[in-house]
Image: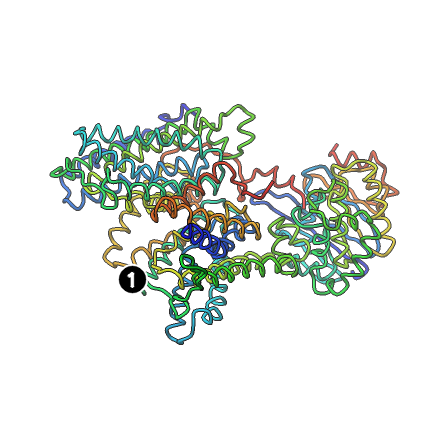
Amino acid sequence: MKTNLLSGRSTILKFIALIIVIVALFSVPSWGSQYTVMFFMLVCMYIGLGQMWNLLAGYAGLVSLGQQIYIGIGGYALAVLSNYYGVPLFLGLIIGGLVAMLISVGLSYLLLRMKGMYFAVATWITAEALIVIFAGWNYVGSGNGMFIKAVRGMPTSTIYYYSLVVAIITVIIVVFLLRSKLGLGLIAIRDNDSAAETSGVNIFKTKLYCMMISSFLTSVIGGLFYMSQVWVQPYAAFAINWTIAGMFIVVIGGIGTVSGPILGAIIYVFLNQYLSQFGGISMIILGIIAILVILFASKGILGTIQDKFGFEILSARRHSDRTFTGKPIEELEGSNL
Amino acid sequence: MSDYLLKAEDINAKYGDFQAVQGASFDIKKGEIISVIGTNGAGKSTLMKAIVGIMKPSGGKVYYKGEDITGIPTHKLVEMGLIAVPEGGRVFPRMSVLDNLIMGSYTPKARKERNQALERVYELFPILKEKANQAAGSLSGGQRQMVAIGRALMSEPELVCFDEISLGLAPTVIKDIYATIRQINKEGLTVILVEQDVKRSLKISDRSYVMLKGKIVLEGNSQELTEDEVKKAYFGL
Amino acid sequence: MDALIQSLIQGVLLGGLYAAIGIGMSLIFGIVKLTNLAHGDFLVLGSYISLVVTSTLGISPFLSLIIVVPVMFCIGFVVQNTMLNKVLSKGAEPTLMITFGLSIVIQNLLLYFFTADARNLHSSITLKSITISDGIRIPVIYLISCVVGVVVILILGAYFKKTYQGKAIMAAADDLEVAQLMGVNIKNIYGLAMGISIATAAIAGVMVGMIYNFYPTSGSSYLVIAFAVVVIGGMGSTYGTLVAGLLFGLAQVLGAHFFGAQAQLLTGYIVLLVMLIFRPQGLFSK
């Protein structure tokens, strides 16, 4: 399994295509308009957001509704560090990521023993509590939020380069993570918690690592986003819309796949920009599209295509024989009337 | 045709791509006890699911009282007098014993006869009357099986499929339950037993069918079949 | 001292309302095993429908329930049967996503038709209160909403205990396949449960609208209350919900009493988080 990363002609072709795409992406600011650069920047951020939500929900079985915790922390860390302590922006992003990681460790100890919907609710409520705390905290400007003074005058292309690098990192991390021992453990957990436990997978640690990675990178994305926005404000920074976006991207693209969120992010940003001209009904359309995709292509666009044609662009998945209900065949036959 | 209460012809059933039942046929006359014997995974439970409408057969026909009932939803079949007792004494664990039994008389026809039916179940299983208000999930395995059987009887059935009735029960309990089945059969109920236990099935039933890998590989009069013969078919030797 | 007693009374009365907010969610979680993230939005939708009914027909919000409840029941039934039932077997994410999608659609539809302005269902009864002593006054509307909440719970409890249909829903929650084997038509049973759930949310929505202002985006704060009540009371427990509503109402009001009005929300969140961490199975289950 590990060796097939770069073996085979088609894989080499894929790899070359990938390099070309990446080079093309880096060249965007040299030919694109301000708007184009911003569009690609948003796509990159949302790819990262989607990948990190997917790592939790699609692979570790942790359906988080609280990714906005880390977005907000990233934004506020950057604002506080650069405004009050004069910390350079790049360093601010990293420190923000570390703070988020620390928070995720604390949350993991409290929340990881919860399952399914309990975990989902707890992460969401934590974010809601942070809104109340930040909105009442004078140090961070209470309800008005903070301006990140240091980013004034920074060209969009700089933030775009950062975002592109982060997006690539999230993809690489997910691909390599899933091919590593940790990934094997994750798949064991996703298939069967208790069986994974007895076969020696440390479930807590595996999930903890996923939480840490996800929180760090999501926080960096939050920092980048607020670099481009300049103004970080509690109701928006900790809003559940962030998780909705991540979820939308992953589910539209294909949950549990690496390439799905990339496609999902492009669709999401495109729809968001395109639909914004319709004002109020844009969100209605977005919501309806999400519902329709889940109803009629429940594996997402790429997942459905993969099932039909049996190919995968960035394979990180280990296939197992499963029936349509997700249960192994023997189990189904074994369960009687 | 009409002398059979139920007749299944060439039934196929699939889980996704996996064909669990491949062309199985069997029949049962009114008042008979038949057994469908097979190992775990032989497809016998899937066959029963296809008969009672829990899953749609991918091929074949089921006739009940001469009427084609293939693919008819379970709740209609229950009204027609065909009911199944699920394996392992599957009760509604959080509901009381009484409520479990009442759920057996869910169909409009059975609701009218509810009180008489309840009396009869209590006669068969006096212990259930004592425990009427306890949560069914708190009962022992044998008692849960009694609830499951009693619940099925509440529906005023003509044909009952018992699925793996002896699974996980102590031998003395199995003996009692088999005695009960024989008794209700004598009172006129037609019975299909789905079993893994070769010896017991042969002893109680009039006719037997042996299933292996989704197919019926042996059938015959239970008295005429020898245990060896059945076991060979059962394991596919 | 009077202020404290006043808070306590208010907390207790809020409890009945909170129970009504949460009961539908608890029901759906216990029976269909899905988390309806649009529960709060359905509640607010109920408030708006009542608003339309009361203003066009000129009737009181209480009377509007005659129209609001059946309409919302149908919406719940249809949503369950046409959308949620289709993805139930595919794990938690699709249902979460669909209810999320519904939440977005409802919020934005309300925003589109009613703007972001504050609305309410105030009537002459809203301002009345019963004076107990100089410092202690009970607003009549709090009392009524509490009674309505308790009545809703009692009716539901009787429905599940006494009727065949209610028992069938409980049986389906325990073991769907066996319920089917006993002759329950399970195709509609989840739709029925969701219809009831959304109808109770709408009743709560009308009560809420008579007490507070509401906005198209108010749903999420009621979702939090619903969650809290469900988690404290234990999933799917009818009477647990009532006690949970009471406890949560008290916790919030006392939080506001001791730490200031803005602490009301935070107290609620913290109570909920502590419950999730230490007793996720609810206070009353063993």
Q: Is residue C143 left or right of residue B154?
A: left
Q: Position of residue A88 (x, y in %)?
A: 17, 29
Q: Nearer the viewer, residue A116 or B231?
A: A116
Q: How is the image coloured?
A: rainbow
Q: Position of residue C187 (x, y in %)?
A: 58, 58
Q: Position of residue A180 (x, y in %)?
A: 41, 25
Q: Residue at x 33, y 64 (%)?
A: C119
Q: Position of residue B71 (x, y in %)?
A: 64, 57
- Graded by Cα atoms within 10 Å as few (under 14), some (14 to 19) or many (20 or more), the crowding at tag 1 reads few
The amino acid type found where label 1 is placed reads: Asp
Q: Which residue occupies the extreme bottom position in the image?
A: C57
Residue A259, by quadrant, is top left
In the picture of the structure, the residue carrying the numbered disc 1 is C117
Q: Residue at x 77, y 55 (%)?
A: B153
Q: Is residue A109 left or right of residue A233?
A: right
Q: Nearer the viewer, residue C202 or B145?
A: C202
In the rendered image, is residue A71 in sight?
yes
Residue C109, by quadrant, is bottom left
